[in-house]
Image (cartoon, rainbow, N blue to C red):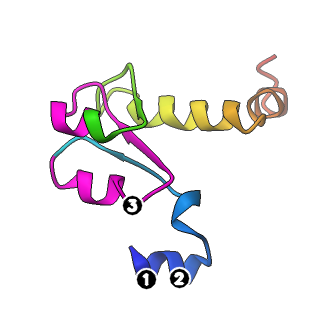
Amino acid sequence: MKRILADAKIDKQQVAYIGDDLTDIVVMRRVGLAIATANARCEVKKAAHFVTQQPGGSGAVREAIEMILQAQGKWDALLQKYEAI
């Protein structure tokens, strides 16, 4: 993770990470936004800042991305770009 952050020239607080299993907790504790899927282990959900409504493999990542774009105020512009609204 340190190498990826250095190569990308970003701070760990700018990173969102989504996981569902025990091995994901290590990274989740080191990023700015830790996300667990709806079907994640209980321990992973406890470590997360946000838990998706959708399970992994069924739209959880899409849900997380849409949530981030909405929080950044970019969602409506994206919908307009693709003529969805």
In terms of image quadrants, where is residue 30?
Answer: bottom left
- Marks 2 and 3, Cα distance to the nearest angstrom? 14 Å
Characterize the local packing of mark 1: few (<14), some (14-19) or many (20 or more) Cα atoms within 10 angstroms: few
Answer yes or no: do the residues labelled 1 and 2 have beta carbons within 8 Å?
yes
Q: Amino acid at mark 1?
A: Arg
Residue marked by disc 1: 3
Q: Is residue 62 above or below residue 85?
A: below
Kindly state the secondary structure of the residue where label 1 is placed: helix
Would you say residue 54 is visible in this rendering? Answer: yes
Q: Amino acid at mark 2?
A: Ala
Q: Is residue 44 magenta?
A: yes
Lateral position of residue 43 relative to residue 53, left or right: left
The structure residue drawn at horizontal position 78% and vertical position 30%, both measured from the top left corner, is 82
Residue marked by disc 3: 30
Query: Between disc 2 and disc 3, whose residue precedes?
Result: 2
User: What is the x, y in percent for residue 80?
Assistant: 84, 27
The structure residue drawn at horizontal position 83% and vertical position 34%, both measured from the top left corner, is 81
Lateral position of residue 78 relative to residue 51, left or right: right
